[in-house]
Amino acid sequence: MIFIIKKQILTMCRLCLVLLIFLFIIPFSQGMLNPAQVYCEALGYQYTTHDDRGFCILPDNSEVDAWEFLQGKVATEYSYCETRGLAIKTVNDSEKCIRFLLDECAVCVLPNGEEVEVTELMNLSFDETVCGDGVCGLPENYNTCPQDCPSGSWDNYCDGASDGICDPDCKYQETPQKDPDCPFCGDNVCGEDENCESCPEDCGECVKKSVCGDAVCDADETQENCCTDCGCPVGMKCIQNKCVEEKCGNGVCEPNFQENYKTCPRDCPSGSPDNYCDKQIDGRCDPDCSEQEDLDCKTQEGLPIIVYVSIVVVLIAIVLFVVLKSRRSETYSYEEY
């Protein structure tokens, strides 16, 4: 009997435990929206499912796995981070990914280097909400529940209200013209996010940076600061981007004024010591050339040897001639006797 009572008590305890699970755990799971779907739709993209898998349809009509998209593994160019000019990273950090009770999630890298989980930065809520609870959550927006989603809220709805608040949904959905409070390219005001490259209509054309040496004398270039492009006055020439007095033609080879056989052959003829190897084959060994550069240098080095050999040959011939002549003279004298 006691055994039966204990068994009944144990059974009742188990039933109570099951009821507790249904009362507490299941309601929480039912009240949690799909983060991947929330993220996809918050960016203005379409969410769909195939074979119990969620997909996000991007602006180029491609479909990517919604969870991989949320974790920054695919199509990062369409992510919240990169569409706002921020870098995106996939990290393994349970502390940063605590919203999903996972170890892996995507973070946006802020300009100061701080890393913030993307949905946290977007201030997204995954709790099912009721209009009037003070929380702007999907599918609420300014149009369906203005008390929870006031003007200027990130609710995937461009309200277009003229209230001094630029609705981020208008700005980042590339429809700022719908909100009179949002600056846009073409409103004749050069805003903080605009410059001469992104919006010349409002900020004016970019001033081209001059480059000395591009053969174009720009407006801010002169003969004084860039004679390479703008030239020099009469009687002067540009040397190392400086105008110096023209020396060529005075009959003196002046290497200090960049004169050499190439720049001023009148003053520096071939073979002049002018810090320039002319490589001319003209019988003159240029002192600025090596043997390999000027063939005349090899010829002149070999010339004395040829001369010496020639002299020796001539001398030997003369000696032989004298000896032979003397012998002939002696022979003639002997025959006479």
Image (cartoon, rainbow, N blue to C red):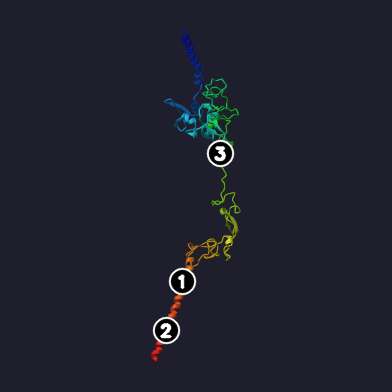
Q: Which residue has dot 2 on it? A: 325
| Residue 201 visible in the picture | yes
CA gap between label 1 and label 2 equals: 28 Å
| Residue 82 visible in the picture | no
Q: Position of residue 204 (x, y in %)?
A: 57, 41
**Residue farthest left in this picture:** 335
Q: Circles 1 and 2: CB distance less than 8 Å?
A: no
Quadrant of the image occupied by residue 336: bottom left
Q: Which residue corresponds to the image point at 46% horizontal and 75% vertical from the top-left?
A: 312
Q: Residues within 10 Å of mark 1 (few under 14, many from 20)?
A: few
Q: Counting residues from the N terminus, which is met first, the one under dot 2 or under dot 3?
A: 3
| Element type where label 3 sits in the image | helix
- Residue type indicated by callout 3: Glu
Q: Which residue corresponds to the image point at 49% horizontal and 34% vertical from the top-left?
A: 76
Of the two numbered discs 1 and 3 in the rendering, the one whose residue sits closer to the viewer? 1
Q: Counting residues from the N terminus, which is met first, the one under dot 1 or under dot 2?
A: 1
Which quadrant of the figure contains the C terminus? bottom left
> 51 and 235: which one is in front?
51
Q: Which residue has dot 1 on it? A: 306
| Element type where label 1 sits in the image | helix
Quadrant of the image occupied by residue 199: top right
Looking at the image, residue 215 lies above or below residue 281: above
Q: Circles 2 and 3: CB distance less than 8 Å?
A: no
Of the two numbered discs 2 and 3 in the rendering, the one whose residue sits closer to the viewer? 2
Q: Residues within 10 Å of mark 3 (few under 14, many from 20)?
A: some
Looking at the image, residue 57 lies above or below residue 134: below
